[in-house]
Amino acid sequence: MEATTTKMKLKKGDQVVVIAGKEKGKTGTVTKVSPASNRVVVAGLNIIKKATKPNPQTGEGGGIIEKEASIHASNVMILDPKTGKGTRKRPQ
């Protein structure tokens, strides 16, 4: 199966509102866009905890780190600054 890249309406730096999932209703800024998987990373949202082993070669200590996981692009909408709600079209 081939990975097809789709054109995304979202760009890095966009203000978005989450419309589905555990973070529904929260807003944030897009920090990373992945057109191949049709997913975006929103700053401060969808935080996961990941256990890491210590790596003496790089000097990193082990432990539990928190980081942002990606959200599917269909679950976010661009935030309209005038109304404060999600919109399908990019505000001018």
Image (cartoon, rainbow, N blue to C red):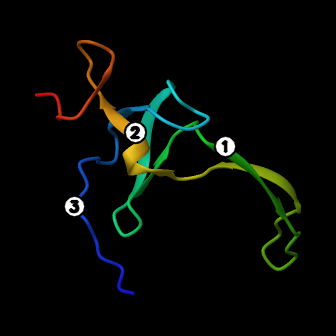
User: Could you tell me how far apart the alpha carbons at marks 3 and 2 are, in whole angstroms?
Assistant: 15 Å
Q: Position of residue 12 (x, y in %)?
A: 34, 47
The residue depicted at 78 percent of the width and 74 percent of the height is: 58
User: Could you tell me how far apart the alpha carbons at marks 3 and 1 are, in whole angstroms?
Assistant: 26 Å
Eye-nearest disc, 1 or 2: 2
Residue 57 versus residue 63 in the image, above or below? below
Q: Earlier in the sequence, mark 1 or mark 2?
A: 1
- What SS does tag 3 mark? loop
In the picture, the disc for residue 47 is: 1
**Relative to 52, 85 lies left or right:** left
Within 10 Å of disc 1 (Cα), the crowding (few <14, some 14-19, many 20+) is: some
- What SS does tag 1 mark? strand
Q: Amino acid at mark 1?
A: Ile
For this rendering, which residue is in front, 16 or 66? 16
For this rendering, which residue is in front, 39 or 32? 39
Residue labelled with disc 3: 7
Residue labelled with disc 2: 76
